[in-house]
Image: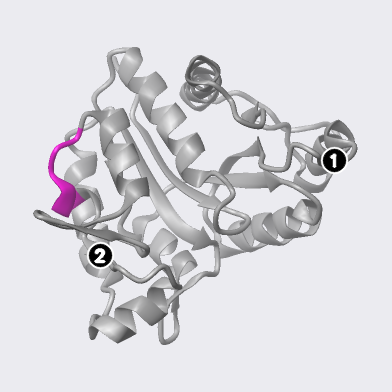
């Protein structure tokens, strides 16, 4: 029997590698013969095409999964590269998390692996009294936290993990992504993150990881998720 993997990918901030990690996991699952679906429910910073607005992160996810229906992958797409709640307000659009949750439920039935990527960080606003965490709660999916490895990541990661756990959702694991090649004592920071988060990482992506490296690391993440790998620390 093929595994049923459903995850929501969030991050400690924007531009810290959520898509980099999500596409690696997606490509690895697909390479193992799994039926893989992806979603980027909300995205801003899109560009105009003859077929409508398109967001690069959503397109990258689609390419990794072999998806073709853009409207289902990215139902809320906005052109300005600003916070989604501002972009939605400018467009006169109310983001409906119940609608997104229904789309996700319908798509989950079709796939062995479904990767849903958020926008920004855990508390990124989507509207008045509405945040990315509310969307995650509506989806009821285990959460993967991507930590951008740079100065300041310890505090951001600890606060994000605490908020995820406090919400009642399962923190399926965390992934380190080195976004600052000049970061001092990176390995020491990773060790500190293990202590702060109470878990070893599902994977750590080096700066500028090549496609072959990403596929291996994505496969490692997949194996941990499938096997229910106990990556917790005895601390």
- The reply to whether residue 210 is in sight is yes
Up the image or down, 85 lies above or below 229; here it is below
Q: Residue at x 55, y 69 (%)?
A: 123
Taking the magenta stretch, the answer to whether it contains residue 136 is no
Q: Is the C-beta separation of discs 2 and 1 under 8 Å? A: no
The stretch in magenta equals: 67-72
The residue lying at 32 percent from left, 85 percent from top is 89
Residue for point 54% across, 48% down = 170
Residues at marks 2 and 1, CA–CA distance in whole angstroms:
36 Å
Residue 39, given in percent of the width and then of the height, sits at: 29, 47
Instruction: Name the outermost residue toward the left.
Output: 50
Mark before the other along the chain sequence, 2 or 1: 2
In-front residue for pair 41/206 = 206
Q: Mark on residue 76?
A: 2
Q: Please, is residue 93 above or below residue 204 in the view?
A: below
Query: In the picture provided, is 170 more to the left or to the right than 129?
Result: right
Question: Viewer-proximal residue, 94 or 58?
Answer: 58
Query: Which sits in the foreground, 16 or 116?
Result: 16
Q: Is residue 70 magenta?
A: yes
List the residue tagged with mark 1: 189
């Amino acid at each position: 029997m093929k595994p049923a993997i459903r995850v929501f990918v969030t991050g400690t901030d924007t531009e810290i590698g959520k898509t980099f990690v999500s596409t690696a996991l997606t490509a690895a699952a697909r390479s193992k013969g799994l039926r893989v679906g992806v979603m980027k429910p909300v995205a801003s910073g899109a560009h105009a095409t003859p077929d409508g607005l398109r967001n690069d992160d959503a397109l990258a996810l689609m390419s990794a999964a072999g998806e073709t229906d853009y409207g289902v992958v990215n139902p809320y797409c906005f052109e300005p590269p600003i916070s989604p709640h501002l972009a939605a307000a400018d467009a006169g659009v109310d983001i409906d998390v119940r609608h997104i949750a229904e789309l996700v439920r319908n798509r989950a039935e079709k796939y062995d692996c479904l990767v849903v990527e958020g926008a920004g960080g855990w508390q990124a606003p989507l509207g008045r009294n509405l945040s990315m965490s509310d969307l995650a709660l509506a989806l009821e999916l285990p959460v993967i936290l991507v930590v951008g490895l740079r100065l300041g990541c310890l505090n951001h990661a600890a606060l994000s993990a605490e908020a995820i756990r406090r919400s009642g959702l399962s923190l399926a694991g965390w992934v380190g992504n080195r976004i600052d090649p000049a970061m001092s004592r990176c390995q020491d920071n990773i060790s500190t993150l293990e202590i702060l988060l109470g878990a070893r990482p599902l994977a750590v992506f080096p700066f500028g990881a090549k496609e072959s490296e990403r596929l291996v690391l994505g496969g490692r993440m997949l194996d941990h998720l499938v096997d229910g790998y106990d990556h917790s620390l005895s601390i």
